[in-house]
Image (tube, rainbow, N blue to C red):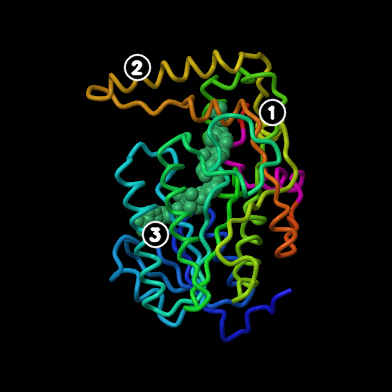
Amino acid sequence: MATRLRPANKKCTVIGGSGFLGQHMVEHLVGKGYTVNVFDIRKGFDNNKVQFFLGDLCRKEDLLPALEGVMVVFHCASPAPSSNNRELFYAVNYIGTKVVIEACKEAGVQKLVLTSSASVVFEGTDIKDGSEDLPYAKKPIDYYTETKILQEKEVLSANNPEGPFLTVAIRPHGIFGPRDPQLVPILVQAAKSGKMKFVIGDGKNLVDFTYVENVVHGHILAAEQLQRDSPLCGKALHITNDEPIPFWVFMSRILIGLGYEAPKYRIPYWLAYYLAFLLSLVLMLLRPFLIINPTFTPMRVALAGTFHYYSCERAKKLMGYKPPVSLREAIEKTVESYPHLRRTA
Ligand SMILES: NC(=O)C1=CN([C@@H]2O[C@H](COP(=O)(O)OP(=O)(O)OC[C@H]3O[C@@H](n4cnc5c(N)ncnc54)[C@H](O)[C@@H]3O)[C@@H](O)[C@H]2O)C=CC1
Ligand SMILES: CC(C)CCC[C@@H](C)[C@H]1CC[C@H]2C3=C(CC[C@]12C)[C@@]1(C)CCC(=O)C[C@@H]1CC3
């Protein structure tokens, strides 16, 4: 196994460090004795142990000051997946990532760890224990995923041990945990407005949900073990909780934990998908007059009604990954962290 980073090499930058995953990354890195720079378009929190650099990753001149003397860059910035802004996804995830690579090389950064997504291979049909060797989706489920594919390809092909500039992509799936602005808040909002009554499909489809601290652990392991001649160089690695769970069991545990009822009726998958598709067409036609962001989108129905879980054998074998937090503990910690979303009478 490769040697760990020496203290002198422990200066890093977290691009997207104000976001959900980014903030957890920063806390763990500081706890492990790293000197941490945060680069983001917004300041998401206060911490006098880290240095903030505010700017747009699409601008090299904004990035360069945040990369001075830095050995490792973690790139976990992206526009929110629920956004409809195609131009923004392309500009930030694809063009912006090329700028990140250029800036890293210019600043002498030696390692780039990208937060990719396991969804880069998902086309809306079942994936069971999928490995990293599955081909990229030819028809990605949305534009966010299309640009995550372009981004990952850029980062992995930039790997150049001679540089040395070493790259690796971490592919988590369904990240959840304290302070997540997406999964639990959207679920609770849907429950509050009476929309969480139906299980889509037969409820048996297994999905990976990954606790944020396990995702952080996977990133830090990869950074520390990314060395010239390491088998991690230029590779993508799934990082999951390694405990796939039926989608609706997971959702029900969160809902019940927060005092809401679990969905109890069934709707066939194809019916839910076509209803969501029809709704999205109607809302598209209405867009010049009225903007509504629906809870049920074809993409969410596909995520809720199909099997999609991934093998993390490669991460186990190549870097000794083992999720530190079990799913049971992760759900408990998550539920406890949202007292403000708990049902009141
Ligand atoms: N949340 C999830 O379930 C999953 C997320 N991912 C990936 O993990 C990464 C982190 O996601 P989250 O923390 O959930 O998202 P987030 O939205 O909480 O954080 C993203 C951060 O990127 C920043 N950002 C966006 N555009 C920027 C720009 N042009 N310049 C500088 N900073 C910019 C935002 O201000 C935000 O702080 C993303 O790359 C996402 O694609 C992958 C798999 C699953
Ligand atoms: C209303 C319900 C049908 C579902 C509510 C929960 C959803 C908001 C989440 C369930 C699976 C999640 C997920 C993502 C976002 C939030 C969910 C759709 C991602 C799309 C986030 C970005 C990725 O890279 C992939 C994720 C897959 C799972």
Q: CA distance from mark 3 to mark 1?
A: 34 Å
Q: Main secondary structure of the magenta part?
A: helix
Residue flagged by tag 1: what amino acid is it? Asn
Position in image of residue 63 (x %, y %): 35, 69
Whether residue 330 is visible: yes
Counting residues from the start of the chain, the first of labels 3 and 2 encountered is 3
Q: CA distance from mark 1 to mark 2?
A: 29 Å
Read off the residue under disc 2. 282
Taking the magenta stretch, the answer to whether it contains residue 328 is: yes
Q: Which mark is residue 141?
A: none
- Relative to residue 71, is residue 316 drawn left or right? right
**Mark count:** 3
Read off the residue under disc 1. 205
Q: Which mark is residue 97?
A: 3
Counting residues from the start of the chain, the first of labels 3 and 1 encountered is 3
Position in image of residue 81 (x %, y %): 44, 42
- Relative to residue 295, is residue 1 drawn left or right? right
SS for tag 1? loop
Position in image of residue 293 (x %, y %): 39, 29
Q: Residues within 10 Å of mark 2 (few under 14, many from 20)?
A: few
Counting residues from the start of the chain, the first of labels 1 and 2 encountered is 1
Residue flagged by tag 3: what amino acid is it? Thr
- 289 over 331 or under it: above or below: above
* For discs 1 and 2, the disc positioned in front in the rendered view: 1
Q: Quadrant of the C terminus?
A: top right
Whether residue 183 is visible: no
Residue flagged by tag 2: what amino acid is it? Val
